[in-house]
Image (spheres, coloured by chain):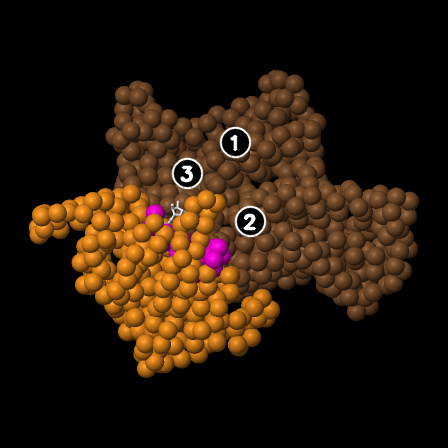
Chain colours: A brown, B orange
Amino acid sequence: MSTQTTSPAERTALLPVIPPNVARATATAGGVLTAASAFLAWTWTSAFPGDLTISGYPGGLQVLTLVAGVLTALFGLASYGVRGTRWLAPAGANGPVLLLALGALGTTWYTLLAISAELGGLANWEPGAWFAAIASVLAVVGALGLPFDEKAAASLGAPAPGATPLQQAWHTVRLALAPRPLRAAKRVPAYQEILIIVGILGLGLLVFTYGIGTAYGELFVGFLILAAFGVAAASKAGLLARASEITSRYRGVTMAGAFVAAALFPFTQTDDQYATVGVNILIFATVALGLNIVVGLAGLLDLGYVAFLGVGAYAAALVSGATASSIGVHFPFWAAVLTGAVASMVFGVAIGAPTLRLRGDYLAIVTLGFGEIFRIAVNNMDGKSGPDVTNGSNGIPNIPDVNIFGLDLGATHDIGGFTLGRFANYYLLMLLITAIVVLVFSRSGDSRIGRAWVAIREDETAALAMGINGFKVKLIAFALGASLAGLAGTVQAHVQYTVVPDPYQFAGPVPPNSAFLLAAVVLGGMGTISGPLLGAALLYLIPYKLQFMQDYQLLLFGVALVVLMRLRPEGMIASRRQKLEFHEDDEELLGPDPVAATGTEDSVGLSKAGA
Amino acid sequence: MATDTKTTGDAAPAAKGTTLLEARGVTMRFGGLTAVNNVDLTVSSGEIVGLIGPNGAGKTTFFNCLTGLYIPTEGQVTYKGTVLPPKPFKVTAAGIARTFQNIRLFSNMTVLENVLVGRHTRTKEGLWSAILRGPGFHRAEAVSREKAMELLDFVGLADKAEHLSRNLPYGEQRKLEIARALASEPGLLLLDEPTAGMNPQETRATEELVFAIRDRGIAVLVIEHDMRFIFNLCDRVSVLVQGQKLVEGTSQVVQSDERVIAAYLGTPFEGEPGEAEAAEVEAAEAGAKEEGK
Ligand SMILES: Nc1ncnc2c1ncn2[C@@H]1O[C@H](COP(=O)(O)OP(=O)(O)O)[C@@H](O)[C@H]1O
Ligand SMILES: [Mg+2]
């Protein structure tokens, strides 16, 4: 049996040698057995983190195997059409079963290989480990034998006549995973839909909290593997489409709920360790979202954006009564915030006004230069090589804690039995800033000015001819982006006690820096709200959790960027527009619609000619 | 500002015959190439004026000079008696809207959003208004949406309002460009080859559309290669050849002008009028259109 001789269109499954019934049973049973293996001892020594030596209950990475196994089994049952599980897979269960089985295989085998690598050889596997290894393979083999869904295959179509063997193989894989076209969902009463939203948000909080709280690198890697396959499965099962259907019906409720869920995060923590991570992620994410206005909406490539964060942080540090401050005033927090935002805006206008009149790459070069100039200038304004403003490379230490209405954010507070430490306090404060930025983004994006930004991004000449003052509109985007970054900078200064020039650089190992900010936007999804937030969370957590790969971090980062841009150029979260923009050649591979194809080709070819 | 449609809409037909656009001695040079050479043109309210000429004659360049995309090397353009500022967005605000020979829609915006962008100059809600969302903002958005939908209905795209504009077929993209231009509530609409790439039925429909636009009180200046289209439609036709205006007059005058025929066919025909000649003209037009693509 070889791929070359059998045309993919005739294939009914990835492994058609297994009868469908047997395949289904094997996959489901494999899931159950994988889950069961988590209760066995996998190794003999607790030297491997998470203590996998205990029979009876799962520990550490075994929890992930348990979850993956249970999910595989559940979707296996859904593929049988068992009552009560069918809602899991409105778009067909076969693809999701395969993805989840692969997720179980991934986490389990990752754990087992890590055991043998860290402890030195397969001898460290207890029988439980062998059991887990075999069970997870069994589930995948079964899942590979599941037949393609006919309706899904019909909606995907046949491969183009001239497809290369590689393209045909890829088409077969897509066939195995293709979701069935979704039927309109049965409407349930509003309160139930809102309960579903609450459930989704709760699940989100749970996953996020678990990810942040993973105590060692191995657990985080296992978590990432499972999360990636889990999300892919949910997407192919049609659950994500259903969820976004409901959440878009109650946008206000969802947004408010998301912030409540995010605000609950510090209450799930017993100490301040992960609240620190949380607040840093929020700062990073908020700045990335501000950058998304400039890059994602208005299409202006800003390579020195982190400097605006720096301007905000320094402005706040200078006016907040730090002993080393050259100004020596102590503004209340709200005034410091305004100072930071306005200072950033002034810099934004000063940089933007001369450059935004130009088109193309000039802006990228100038902003790149500005970012570096800011850091170098701040480094030199120490009273020796320049005026004494920023205290040079020593920075401004001992920035007093924020005091809002007599509430000292530097102190620990007890609220309803929960103890919130310093970083938890700042987490909540920063969340407020994030909420403001989200609000500004969504409201300005959906308005006359936001449409003008997108129009400029799409075709500047046409936008001008439609009456848009391109320069003014771009300057507004640039200044707004700058002041939002400044806003985040004011909180950052207080969180860190100290501001120093070095972190505000173009590229470095620790986010946020300009390159990581841009990557968070591009990887997450340009023009979306949740994209940069998700992108920033991942780009912060991955280097933070995986300290061991610090030396290769930028390399891996580059590889990940290239791979993602090849497979999913619209980023992890696609805006409504880009979803349609990027996956057109996929359709073309499957026999293009002649009218649409000529239409696009013409307009592309001609628009190059210029008006 | 917001009442501009009303004023142009009601006043223009009443004042039929007043000069809207007046271009005097417009010259555009690109280095050594004179693309437009000392061209005069007037468009009065209520008129449909045609601008024809072989490819490369300078028609599009002339349009760009009128709309501020190019600053003419010499000459002056006035609209309703005032000199037009050399900024495209100010020209649009003054009341001249245009479409492009190579469709330039905002391809990743929806059909409705494209038309809403066209309303930019007729609305003034800024960033603060968008962020604070007072009652004024919602009212302005609602009015804009209503007017945009009315225009989509006018060109026959109302049922596609939520489609991405890039996914529309070619003919509908051209219609959408017209709707987007109309959204700026112009007094004069410039159409650059509005039927290029259309089949005969679509061309007829566009003809009707242009008449309907004129009936809304909007004067139209149209570039086209389809002679039947031009001669059916236009009150006056101006012929541009190698950057210079050759003839101007009614359809009949231009149609029978030998210099025009010569310009289009290269050599004048002698002693072989009638069917054969008409066929040749058609063929030449078709050839010209191919080249234009
Ligand atoms: N931006 C430009 N730079 C240099 N030459 C140009 C430019 N735009 C147009 N031209 C030239 O001007 C002439 C007229 O072009 P155009 O106005 O597009 O003709 P038409 O629209 O009548 O077919 C052509 O020879 C063209 O190559
Ligand atoms: Mg032209």
* Mark 2 and mark 3: Cα distance apart in space: 49 Å
Does the image show residue B119?
no
The secondary structure type at the circle numbered 1 is: helix
Q: Looking at the image, is mark 3 or mark 1 earlier in the sequence?
A: 3
Instruction: Report how far apart the C-alphas of labels 3 and 1 lie in the structure.
Output: 14 Å
Could you say whether the residue bearing mark 3 is in a helix, strand or loop? helix
In the rendered view of the protein, which quadrant contains the N terminus of chain A? top left
Q: Is residue A231 magenta?
A: no
- Count residues near mark 1 (Cα–Cα under 10 Å), then give few for <14, some for 14-19, many for 20+: many
Which residues are the magenta region? B56-74
Tell me where residue B187 sits by quadrant: bottom left
Kind of residue at disc 2 = Arg
In reply to whether residue B58 is colored magenta, the answer given is yes
Direction front: furthest residue: B270
On the picture, is A460 further left or further right than A558? left
- Which chain does tag 1 point to? A
How many angstroms separate mark 1 from mark 2 (CA)?
47 Å
**Which image quarter: residue B51?**
bottom left
Residue B28, given in percent of the width and then of the height, sits at 44, 53
Q: Closer to the camera: disc 2 or disc 3?
A: 2
Residue ID at (76%, 62%) = A339
Report the amino acid beneath label 3.
Val
- Provide the residue designation for mark 2: A359
Residue on which the image places disc 1: A106
Q: Which residue is mark 3?
A: A97
For badge 1, the amino acid type reads: Gly
| Residue A61 drawn above or below residue A603 | above
The image shows residue A603 at horizontal and vertical percentages of 36, 47
